[in-house]
């Protein structure tokens, strides 16, 4: 079943219109950010068939779109609430876990940093390295256009980027398979994983 990955499109295409309500998130403030991320159709069911599940820790919530994670059309949606921004869009305390229930192996994706300008997403994966590594490439980074909304009453500017397509960075699929104890070749190189919508918040300066 894992070989179905070969026929799948993009993994973290933090997709077009990931519609998730900010569950109990604090009001946005200048210098902060928010991300909605949705896996591609078929990703969750293929992982589940191999005994692998996705879930979140810390400042994030998750939901399933479709009948279940085992359904062919099922998708996992991550809502990463407002967090501090330093370099790029840094979600401190929001971790994504890929867990193999068959052997209790896991990959922890800590504090992912989205760099829209460079077209990459970096994160610390303790099981692989103490330093941040490139986890995803944003395959349509050059085509992303910002939508700016000004809330003069709140003196807040929202700069939104919708439909960022995320694919596993070159060479990373083999490392993930190895860390999870999956058969060699289970994940194709540069697998399209998900889509994401990213919002950045800044202050509207008074004249």
Image (cartoon, rainbow, N blue to C red):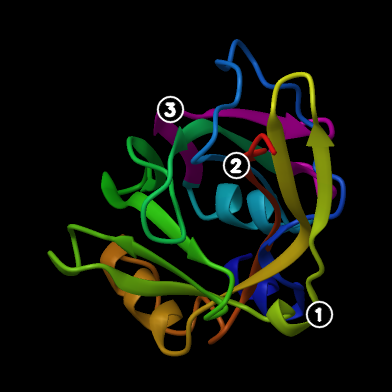
Secondary structure under tag 1 reads: helix
- Which residue position is annotated with label 1? 143
- For the residue pair 94 and 193, the one nearer the viewer reads as 94
User: What residue is rendered at 48% in x and 48% in y?
Assistant: 51
- x 81%, y 50%: residue: 148
Q: Nearer the viewer, mark 2 or mark 1?
A: 2
For marks 1 and 3, the one nearer the N-term is 3
Does 104 sit left or right of 171 as displayed? Answer: left
Q: Indicate left or right for 8 with 84 as reference.
A: right
Which residue is labeled 3 in the image?
59
Cα gap from disc 2 to disc 1, whole angstroms: 23 Å
User: In x, y percent, where is residue 191?
Assistant: 61, 77
Residue 111 point in image, percent of width and height: 34, 48
Determine the secondary structure under disc 3: loop
> Which quadrant of the structure image shows residue 190?
bottom right
Q: What residue appears at the point 69 percent right and 78 percent down from the top-left corner? A: 141
Label 1 packing within 10 angstroms: few (<14), some (14-19), many (20+): few
Look at the image and give the residue range highlighted in magenta. 53-75
The answer to whether residue 17 is above or below residue 4 is above
Q: Which residue is mark 2?
A: 202
| Mark-to-mark CA distance, 2 and 3 | 21 Å
Contact? badges 2 and 3 (CB < 8 Å): no
Q: Which mark is residue 115?
A: none
Q: Is residue 145 visible?
A: yes
Residue placed furthest toward the top:
24
In front: 149, or 107? 149
How crowded pointer 3 is (Cα within 10 Å; few <14, some 14-19, many 20+) is rated as some
């Amino acid at each position: 079943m894992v070989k179905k990955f070969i026929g799948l499109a993009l993994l973290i295409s933090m997709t077009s219109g990931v519609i998730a309500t900010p569950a109990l998130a604090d009001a946005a403030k200048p210098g902060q950010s928010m991300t909605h991320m949705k896996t591609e159709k078929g990703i969750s069911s293929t992982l589940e068939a191999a005994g692998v599940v996705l879930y979140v820790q810390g400042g994030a919530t998750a939901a399933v779109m479709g009948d279940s994670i085992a359904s062919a059309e099922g998708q996992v949606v991550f809502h990463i609430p407002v967090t501090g921004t330093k370099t790029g869009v840094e979600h401190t305390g929001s971790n994504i876990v890929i867990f193999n229930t068959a052997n209790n192996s896991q990959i922890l994706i800590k504090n992912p940093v989205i760099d829209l300008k460079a077209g990459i997403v970096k994160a610390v994966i303790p099981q692989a390295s103490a330093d941040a590594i490139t986890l995803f490439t944003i395959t349509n980074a050059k085509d992303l256009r910002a939508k700016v909304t000004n809330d003069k009453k709140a003196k807040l500017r929202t700069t939104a980027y919708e439909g960022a397509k995320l694919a596993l960075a070159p060479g990373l699929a083999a490392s993930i398979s190895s860390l999870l104890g999956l058969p060699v070749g289970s994940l194709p190189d540069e697998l399209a994983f998900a889509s994401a919508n990213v919002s950045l918040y800044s202050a509207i300066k008074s004249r």
